[in-house]
């Protein structure tokens, strides 16, 4: 099948001249990227979360001039994230410690992958038509979906997003037949080295490119060029992979981030492999759940129940596509166009199989539904989408050809419409992630004064992030900085109480245990409400200014099964907006250093403005903890 004349490209790989239709089609197809960029800019928060804290020792060593190659090459759990570590160190310095620079780079990696899919489509199935741009729009709705909110808003995830961009562009470069073979080889090797040393699934770039070069009928004009490429590729692959697993392949991460494997232990994948060998049924269920994960979040449905069924359906559809491609494999032009998508699909399936084996023994089955994995799984769907497009275009039936465009428009429109709910749900989860990060910022500011009541927003323990937060604070990289005093005046308190429609204390009572319970609700904002970042409780006397003695955070309850991993790192128990604005706490009289009678007040804390707002009410506490009766 010939590429249409208007889309044959010069040596650079791009059309000689882009007309207004091309530009309009491009902007239309990549409109999801623009929308996502706006969402990321609106919801990104500068605060470390869980694995982000692993970067702090490297930052400290770099500042001291003691950083070594071993520090950069050491495994993070089961991954060698050499290049992401270099990026982190560079951007932390440039951005003054602002993690939003890293989040921005993560978006760039996603955009790079999307542009790679566009270029791969141009080399294979692309035609300048509404249908073609519609297919690319559908692909980009998946690539830039806010359903991957953790990838887009969690700084450490730049390591997770980089490999797929490298893999896709390696496939693109292999298709640039006007390049000399050694130029393609060197470019692909550079991408493969970066991919391998970014995250674990990046290692599958080696078999992916090998298979593509081996099976592409038009890869080179002579056989020796193909075999020279494969020989060089194999030599470098064996060397790189040998170093990857052979050079001190022991966990270097904190045990709380490495599934309880301590530094110096075998990576957790070794323990999981033993479980996988004895539980093939569990392995299959985990694998199919991962495959179906991109489409598993249907309203009011448990993704753990739906994902395996969708996964089996997608695997069956891919098998059908592969069979139809093989039937027509004697058509060299058709086969040349299909092989890159088969290579991409094969890469994804291998990566999903590896993740399954390395994670199935480390937790429940719902770990396969984490939204971080969608950034891998979605490319199987995209490969299937373009394989179907190729088969669709290659069908010679006259009846089919006369109705092909109409049917394509209907099917693509329906599939695009199905992305509405995942985008709405993803947007909601991005907002919830942002609120949780604000609450984490507020809690972290007081980490030197008391333990967090809800530490799992920040990390698995209190001590680990406390230590590293003090390091970042000392280096000037933690913003907002840790508070040194508990005086309320540092937060510019607004003494006029908030309106009762926005904030009120609903109860303040003494318990039989001698503790005092307080609960209420608070909403920040005027036109658009959001939960309070924390409630500051203060004590004061006639001769002593208000002093903070605790920070109330939202409660941490076990999440229902369908939301368990969607709500991780948020400290939330449900997606019900009514629960977002409520708070409760119990405290003892011993938390207040003043021994005589004191007056207790509650203040709404806005961490973005570093301001405290008075909430209606004041309660007098006697030395024995009893609440004084109102006169």
Image (tube, rainbow, N blue to C red):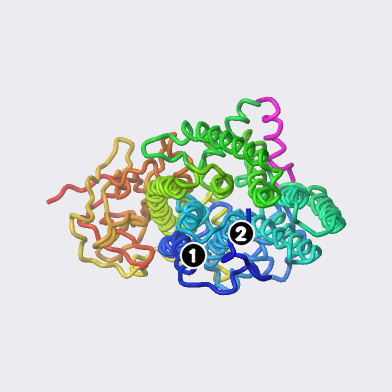
Determine which residue is flagged by label 2. 3
Q: Residue 265: say if magenta.
A: yes
Determine which residue is flagged by label 1. 26
CA separation in Å, label 2 and label 1: 19 Å
What x and y, as percent, mark residue 80? 71, 53
Q: Is residue 76 visible?
A: no
Dividing the picture into quadrants, the one containing residue 548 is: bottom left
What x and y, as percent, mark residue 85? 66, 61
174 or 481: nearer the viewer: 174
Q: Which element is circle 1 on?
A: helix
What x and y, as percent, mark residue 365? 55, 33
Residue at image position (60%, 61%) is 119
Q: Is residue 463 visible?
A: yes
Tag shown at residue 217 = none
Residue at image position (34%, 65%) is 488
Residue at image position (79%, 58%) is 220
What x and y, as percent, mark residue 99? 53, 64
Residue furthest to the front: 398
444 or 627: nearer the viewer: 444
Residue furthest to the left: 631
Q: Which element is circle 2 on?
A: loop
Examine the rendered structure and indicate whether residue 455 appears above or below residue 120: above
Examine the rendered structure and indicate whether residue 176 appears above or below residue 522: below
Query: Which is nearer the N-term, disc 2 or disc 1?
Result: 2
Mark nearest the camera among 2 and 1 is: 2
Q: Main secondary structure of the magenta part?
A: helix
Examine the rendered structure and indicate whether residue 478 appears above or below residue 582: below
Dividing the picture into quadrants, the one containing residue 38 is: bottom left
Dividing the picture into quadrants, the one containing residue 115 is: bottom right
328 or 536: nearer the viewer: 328
Q: Write the start and end of the magenta stretch as one range.
A: 263-279
Q: Residue 53: say if magenta.
A: no
């Amino acid at each position: 099948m010939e590429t249409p004349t208007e889309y044959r490209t010069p040596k650079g790989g791009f059309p000689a001249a882009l007309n207004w239709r091309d530009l309009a089609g491009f902007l239309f197809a990549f409109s999801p990227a623009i929308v996502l960029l706006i969402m990321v800019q609106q919801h990104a928060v500068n605060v470390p979360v869980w694995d982000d804290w692993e970067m702090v020792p490297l930052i400290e060593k770099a500042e001291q001039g003691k950083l070594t190659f071993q520090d950069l090459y050491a495994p993070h759990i089961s991954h060698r994230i050499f290049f992401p570590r270099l990026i982190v160190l560079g951007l932390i310095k440039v951005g003054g410690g602002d993690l939003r620079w890293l989040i921005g780079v993560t978006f760039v990696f996603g955009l790079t992958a999307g542009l790679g899919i566009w270029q791969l489509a141009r080399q294979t199935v692309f035609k300048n038509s509404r249908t073609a741009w519609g297919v690319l729009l559908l692909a980009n709705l998946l690539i830039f979906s806010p359903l991957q909110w953790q990838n887009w808003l969690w700084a450490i995830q730049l390591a997770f997003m980089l490999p797929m961009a490298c893999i896709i562009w390696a496939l693109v470069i292999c298709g640039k037949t006007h390049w000399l073979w050694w130029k393609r080889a060197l470019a692909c090797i550079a991408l493969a080295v970066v991919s391998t040393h970014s995250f674990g699934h990046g290692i599958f770039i080696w078999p992916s490119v090998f298979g593509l070069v081996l099976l592409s009928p038009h890869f080179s004009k002579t056989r020796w060029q193909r075999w020279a490429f494969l020989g060089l590729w194999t030599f470098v692959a064996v060397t790189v992979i040998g170093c990857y697993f052979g050079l001190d392949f022991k966990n270097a991460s904190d045990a709380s981030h490495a599934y309880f494997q301590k530094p110096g232990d075998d990576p957790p994948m070794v323990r999981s492999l033993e479980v996988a060998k004895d539980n093939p049924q569990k392995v299959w269920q985990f694998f199919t759940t991962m495959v179906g994960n991109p489409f598993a979040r249907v309203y009011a449905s448990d993704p753990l129940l739906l994902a395996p069924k969708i996964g089996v359906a997608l695997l069956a559809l891919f098998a059908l596509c592969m069979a139809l491609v093989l039937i027509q494999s004697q058509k060299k032009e058709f086969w040349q166009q299909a092989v890159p998508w088969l290579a991409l699909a094969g890469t994804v399936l291998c990566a999903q199989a590896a993740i399954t084996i390395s994670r199935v023994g480390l937790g429940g089955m719902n770990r396969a539904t984490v939204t971080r994995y969608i950034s891998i799984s979605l490319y199987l769907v995209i490969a299937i989408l373009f394989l179907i497009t190729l088969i669709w275009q290659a069908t010679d039936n006259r009846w089919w050809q006369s109705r092909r465009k109409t049917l394509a428009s209907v099917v693509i429109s329906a599939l695009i419409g199905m992305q509405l709910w995942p985008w709405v749900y993803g947007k909601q989860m991005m907002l919830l992630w942002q609120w949780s990060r604000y609450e984490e910022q507020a809690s972290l500011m007081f980490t030197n004064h008391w333990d967090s009541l809800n530490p799992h927003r920040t990390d698995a323990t209190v001590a680990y992030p406390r230590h590293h937060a003090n390091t970042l604070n000392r280096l000037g990289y933690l913003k907002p900085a840790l508070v040194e005093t508990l005086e309320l005046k540092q937060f510019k308190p607004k003494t006029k109480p908030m309106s009762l429609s926005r904030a009120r204390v609903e109860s303040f009572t003494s318990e039989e245990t001698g503790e005092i319970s307080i609960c209420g609700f608070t909403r920040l904002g005027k036109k658009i409400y959001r939960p309070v970042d924390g409630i500051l409780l203060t004590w004061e006397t006639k001769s002593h200014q208000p002093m903070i003695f605790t920070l109330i955070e939202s409660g941490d309850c076990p999440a229902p099964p369908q939301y368990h991993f969607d709500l991780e790192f948020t400290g939330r128990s449900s997606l019900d907006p009514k629960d977002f604005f409520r708070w409760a706490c119990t405290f003892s009289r011993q938390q207040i250093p003043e021994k005589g009678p004191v007056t207790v007040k509650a203040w709404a804390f806005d961490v973005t403005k570093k301001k405290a707002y008075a909430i209606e009410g004041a309660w007098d506490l006697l030395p024995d903890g009893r609440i004084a009766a109102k006169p």
